[in-house]
Image (cartoon, rainbow, N blue to C red):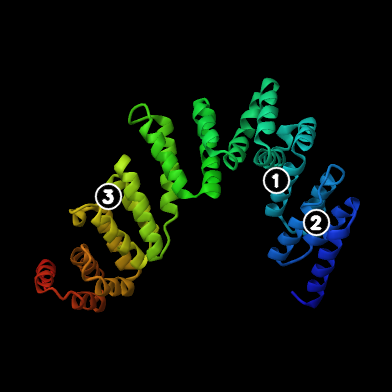
Amino acid sequence: MGPAEFDEIARLRKEVRTASRGAVPGLAYRAMEIPDANERRTLLGEIYNRIDESNWQEVLDQFGRSYNQTGRTLDREYLFALSVAGQRLGPDIMEGWKERGLSKHEDESWYTFYGWAGKDPNAAKKWLDELGVNDPAQSKRLLPGLLGGLALHDSDRAIEMLASLPKEDRNACIGHFTWNLIQNEGLDRAVDWMIGVQQSAEGKDDPYAKKVRDEILGRVFGSAQTSSDSAAMLASRLEKINEVLPLEDGQLAGKLAQVKGGAALDLMSRLAAGKVLGERSEESTTFQSTVRLTAKTSPEETIQWLAANTSSPIQADAALVACRFFLSAGDEASLAAALDVVKDPVVRRRIEKELGQ
């Protein structure tokens, strides 16, 4: 951005603080013209706080005007505007969408309702219950928004409500509810919820318990990154889950492929020290596939890890698996380097013998 754009941002900020309610839509349009996404969203956030019953529709209309004039799509800003409008004017705006036809304004009504439920879940629930009498289909469609908003206020109550729903409604709500629970209270709270569901499940194949388990495990594995700290946190969560819900070796192998480099080997070392992989980790499909993938994608980092972790319970087996891969790939330099970091003569002879060296 150049000086002119920065000057416009400064002017807008000043005008927003003193503008009349009628001037708010025009200010919103000018903010939409700002090319820098961060500055644009910050300014629009300030403008949304000036929304009231007299101008909310006109503010929303500016998004269509901006698209027609510039072709720029501002989907994130639009959905955020709906959510804020719901927080400020939930019942009035929802009645407006209802009069126009909720099925014709599904995105608008959903995000408005979600904002309202996050601000006043009791009032939103009462409105939704009344809607369900005459329009059960739209009531079900909006139900995940209620549970998501309620999770921001009282997660225990939201969990009880979720568990009490009919199967079809419950399954439709789990994903959005989980996202809100994690955003508000963190992944460890979601893991505790999953463990509680497993412990109270009616039989091993309880559909609700399985759905919750799959959702949370997906989030747990998705939290894995490339640092040793993230590997340590993931290992801790997996050990905790494994105490209640034994994790199958094959289940872990594919899920952990997103953990890269030395962090993947750190994770294997930590899991081998616990009960997830245990003492026979070298026979584990998860261990074998993780080390092979690390050797393939990060050969230098693999060798550095082997050299720096000679006391790890998996160092010898990891070296063997890595050397097997380097040999099969024809990577003689990496094979020699991996063998060179194995200082224990017994382990080295074992590897050389197995590789036919």
Q: Residue at x 21, y 68 (%)?
A: 311
**Residue 106 rendering spot, x and y as whole percentages:** 69, 37
- Which disc is residue 66 wearing? 2
Residue that carries the numbered disc 3 in the rendered image = 276
* Badge 3: residue crowd in 10 Å (few <14, some 14–19, many ≥20): many
Question: Which residue sits furthest top?
Answer: 133
Q: Nearer the viewer, mark 2 or mark 1?
A: 1
> Which residue occupies 64% across, 27% down?
137
Asked if 199 appears above or below 74 in the picture, the reply is above
Would you call the spot at circle 2 few (<14 residues within 10 Å), some (14-19), or many (20 or more)? some
Q: Earlier in the sequence, mark 2 or mark 3?
A: 2
Q: Quadrant of the C terminus?
A: bottom left
Q: CA distance from mark 3 to mark 1?
A: 42 Å
Which quarter of the rendered picture does the N terminus lie within? bottom right
**Three-letter amino acid code at the position of disc 3:** Val
Location of residue 203 with respect to 236 vertically, above or below: above
Frontmost residue, 258 versus 125: 125
Rendering quarter of residue 301: bottom left
